[in-house]
């Protein structure tokens, strides 16, 4: 029988620890951890994610500040806001929700966030620290950090001898995920849209991690029997069986059929998603301790 990872449960244990740490910080040094979330434009999915992040920050006892900027915001205005947040001692974590509207360049904005407040782990300093295996002073991108919790829960700390395949090579997920797996001694392949015979590459994986944004791309015969499958995709598809105009969320993995071949699998929704928010809270409290300690 396949084991379906309960992301919500795992995330809530992380959140409980964050709340304890936030209480402790406030008790011992009178500091309230502060998270600033910046969103530009009116993409409904991004607004939903940002709302969930701000709400969870409040629940953790943080000072949660949301900056909602119009889609006409200029590059200079956005950089100025990040500069102000960098200087603000009550803010310990800064997140600029991606993607930004097309007229804005995300890279200069991301790189302008102080590495110590970069709770997304996207600044080159944090990406570099991860690349050299320094997770003690850097901050790690939230979704890969969350996926790694599931991997460790299933396989332990040492992945020696295991082959991990990461499908997707984004800075936000694929690259940091591969680094985390490598740091844990896995043998790692990064596959992507230009990989030849992707299904055959996936079939060699003991740990298969998929983040490509293509609904239900991974089929049962892409999965090695007994593998661990981590699905990072969140895709909204129309679902006529639920009625006119109805939609539902699915991952990049065809969940039902892959449950027949995998030993361990994450569902969508309720798998990696809740962990992303939990790890964002964890990064914020880590940043708050480091900046105030
Ligand atoms: N958009 C989708 N996921 C993320 C994330 O983890 N961080 C940011 N900043 N934007 C996102």
Image (cartoon, helix red, strand yellow):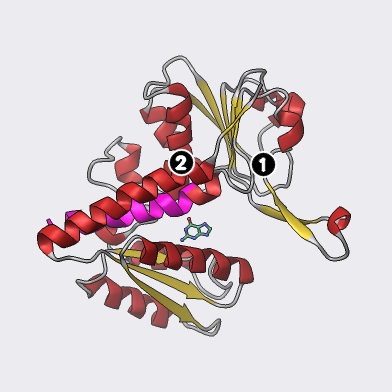
Does residue 286 belong to the magenta stretch? yes
**Residue 252, x across and y down, in percent:** 68, 43
Q: Crowding near pointer 1: few (<14 within 10 Å), some, many (20+)? A: few
**Residue 43, x across and y down, in percent:** 61, 72
Which region of the structure is painted magenta? 275-293
Residue that label 1 marks:
193
Circle 2 SS class: helix
Name the image quarter holding the C terminus: bottom left
User: Is 43 situated above or below 160?
Assistant: below
Q: Crowding near pointer 2: few (<14 within 10 Å), some, many (20+)? A: some
**Residue 264, x across and y down, in percent:** 59, 27
Residue that label 2 marks:
10
Circle 1 SS class: loop
N-term-proximal mark, 2 vs 1: 2
In percent of the image, x 65 and y 27: which residue is there?
202
**Residue 31, x across and y down, in percent:** 17, 65
Could you tell whether 72 is left or right of 215 in the image?
Answer: left
State which quadrant residue 185 falls in: top left
In percent of the image, x 44 and y 29: which residue is there?
153
Name the image quarter holding the N terminus: top right
Marking on residue 241? none
Q: Measure the C-alpha gap from mark 2 to mark 1.
A: 31 Å
User: Is 51 situated above or below 255?
Assistant: below
In percent of the image, x 58 and y 44: which residue is there?
232
């Amino acid at each position: 029988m396949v084991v379906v990872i309960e992301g919500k449960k795992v995330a809530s244990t992380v959140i409980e620890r964050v709340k304890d740490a936030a209480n402790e910080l406030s008790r011992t040094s009178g500091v309230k951890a502060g998270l600033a979330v910046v969103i530009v434009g009116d993409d409904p999915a991004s607004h939903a994610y940002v709302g969930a992040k701000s709400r969870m920050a409040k629940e953790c006892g943080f000072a949660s500040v949301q900056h909602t900027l119009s889609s006409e915001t200029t590059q200079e205005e956005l950089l100025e806001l990040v500069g102000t947040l960098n200087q603000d001692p009550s803010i310990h974590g800064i997140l600029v929700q991606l993607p930004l509207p097309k007229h804005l360049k995300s890279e200069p904005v991301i790189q302008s966030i102080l590495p110590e407040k970069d709770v997304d782990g996207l600044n080159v300093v944090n990406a570099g620290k991860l690349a050299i295996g320094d997770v003690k002073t850097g901050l790690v991108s939230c979704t890969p950090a969350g996926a790694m919790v599931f991997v460790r829960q299933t396989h332990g700390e040492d992945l020696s001898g295991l082959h991990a395949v990461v499908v997707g090579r984004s800075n936000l997920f694929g690259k940091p995920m591969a680094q985390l797996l490598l740091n844990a001694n896995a043998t790692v392949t990064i596959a992507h849209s230009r990989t030849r015979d992707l299904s055959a590459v996936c079939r060699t994986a003991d740990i298969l991690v998929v983040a490509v944004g293509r609904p239900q791309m991974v089929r049962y015969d892409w999965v090695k029997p007994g593998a661990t499958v981590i699905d990072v995709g969140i895709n909204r598809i129309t679902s006529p069986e639920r009625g006119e105009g109805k939609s539902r969320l699915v991952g990049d993995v065809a969940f039902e059929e892959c449950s027949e071949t995998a030993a361990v699998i994450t569902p969508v929704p309720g798998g990696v998603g809740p962990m992303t928010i939990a790890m964002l809270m964890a990064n914020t409290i880590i940043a708050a301790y480091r900046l105030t300690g």
